[in-house]
Amino acid sequence: MIGKIGAGFLAAGLMLGGTPLAAQMMDDAEAPAPAANAVDAMRAVPQSQMEVQLSYAPLVKTAAPAVVNIYTKTIVKAQRPALLDDPLFQRFFGDKFSFGMPRDRVRGSLGSGVIVRSTGVIVTNNHVIEGADEIQVVLADRREYPAKVVLADPKTDLAILQIDTKGENLPVLPIADSDDVQVGDIVLAIGNPFGIGQTVTSGIVSANARTQQGISDFGFFIQTDAAINPGNSGGALIGMHGELLGINSAIYSRTGASNGIGFAVPANMVKSVLNAALNEGQLARPWLGIKGQPVTAALAETLGLARPGGVLVDSVFPGGPAAKGGLVPGDVIMDVNGREVLDEAALNFRIATLEDGDTATLTVRRGDTDEALEVGLSLPPEEPARNVTRLVGGHPFLGVTVGNLSPRFNEELGVDPMAKGVIVLQLEPRTAAARFQFLAPGDLILSVNGREVSTVSDIEPALEAVDEAYRYQVQRQGRVQECEIVPNRSFRCAVVG
């Protein structure tokens, strides 16, 4: 497919200025060789797609210096018997028995990045630098700098790095409006595949707004057939105007090498994360305050829609932005600020690229009519406070860490945006709760010993009010279970709803 596209593009380039190439070649043969400065002028950076004819070199010459290679080192701690580090054991035997024990090792990784501010601000993928103990950035001119992480965002798989340029201004890539990208646009991918050094590949935008790829929480990507391989992660996907369209993030492949299906995080999401990094590194995304579902073919027929698409509003958070803007259950959100919304991932992306205080214009289908609603966006509230607590005492929940749910905490945890109550966050190893699985991370504790649990502060008093057995209700994966623990005797659970 790439070969055919390249051939078609070359054929188009064989007509220059309406004159057949053969005729131009004869004229060139008769004309004197152009001066060096004339050649440079002929190879100036193209100002339109029509000016790109037989070479991407002028474009690459401008863009490539802003793409960097990133190398990371991670210290992997070796597993040692705990006895060897015991102070009493060390006192008598020292390191006598440590010979032959596994030692810490260093694991290296590589990727790419893009300079987006001349002061040394670089954007890359979160998975490139995640867990790294040392990050080294190598510029296109081979200079090396240590880098520090300003902001890492696993939800978008983006990270912002900073290097100390000692006051020197570095070349940057301007960031495009990725909403203007169209399927069929010619693109270049620049990165460091397999660590062999900076490499440029070409292709087209194969699909836009590709969702449900499982790459990040905001599953909304530009798909390209430009060759992207391991090491390209964090590199640039650029358009014919030399602007950053996206950050290359993942490929679809059974072998680990390019299969002509690559995905890039759109530039508008990059802008959102970058702005947060420049704003003291605080990432706070606005909130709509609804729970919805995609409009399938069956739903579209039931709702009287011409085709599937949009998000059906199931519930609206009281007092949230959507409620204040007039959304009600049963509305179908069709677009945001004139941009079509096909599913929940697209809706989340559109809202996430806006900022706190922005006004979003939502087109909703209500009954048989379309309405435009103005929704003032705000940050999700944290009410009640999360109050993350490790439970202590002589009860079966010893060592269980719990917290209060709220719209903001729900977003961080990736749980139902409408969920309320107390959630189980962690089980301490080797406790009864962990060994016998009385609870599991993600459980919502609904009641304990007949007392409703609304906040963390309700749990411990309820655990003290026990006769022979501890009885409690939890919601696990959408189903309610009623459980009973008789200490030192039995444990049972039954699904009741």
Image (spheres, grey):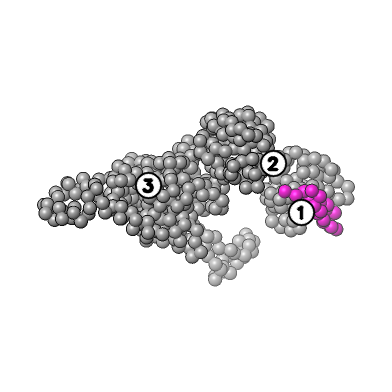
The stretch drawn in magenta includes residue 267 = no
Observer-side mark, 3 or 1, equals 3
Mark 1: secondary structure: loop
Q: Is residue 53 left or right of residue 311?
A: left
Secondary structure beneath disc 2?
loop
Q: Amino acid at mark 1?
A: Phe
Left or right of 315? Residue 334 is left
Q: Which residues are magenta?
A: 478-497
Q: Position of residue 405 (x, y in %)?
A: 68, 40
Residue beneath disc 3: 239
C-beta proximity under 8 Å, tags 3 and 2 = no
Q: Which residue is mark 1?
A: 438
Q: Position of residue 138 (x, y in %)?
A: 36, 53
Q: Are marks 3 and 1 in contact (CB under 8 Å)?
A: no
Q: Which residue is mark 2?
A: 419
Q: Position of residue 337 (x, y in %)?
A: 51, 34
Q: Going from the N terminus, do you reach mark 3 or mark 1 first?
A: 3
Total marks shown come to 3
Q: Residues within 10 Å of mark 2 (few under 14, many from 20)?
A: few
Q: CA distance from mark 1 to mark 2?
A: 21 Å
Q: Earlier in the sequence, mark 3 or mark 2?
A: 3
Nearer the observer, 395 or 138: 138
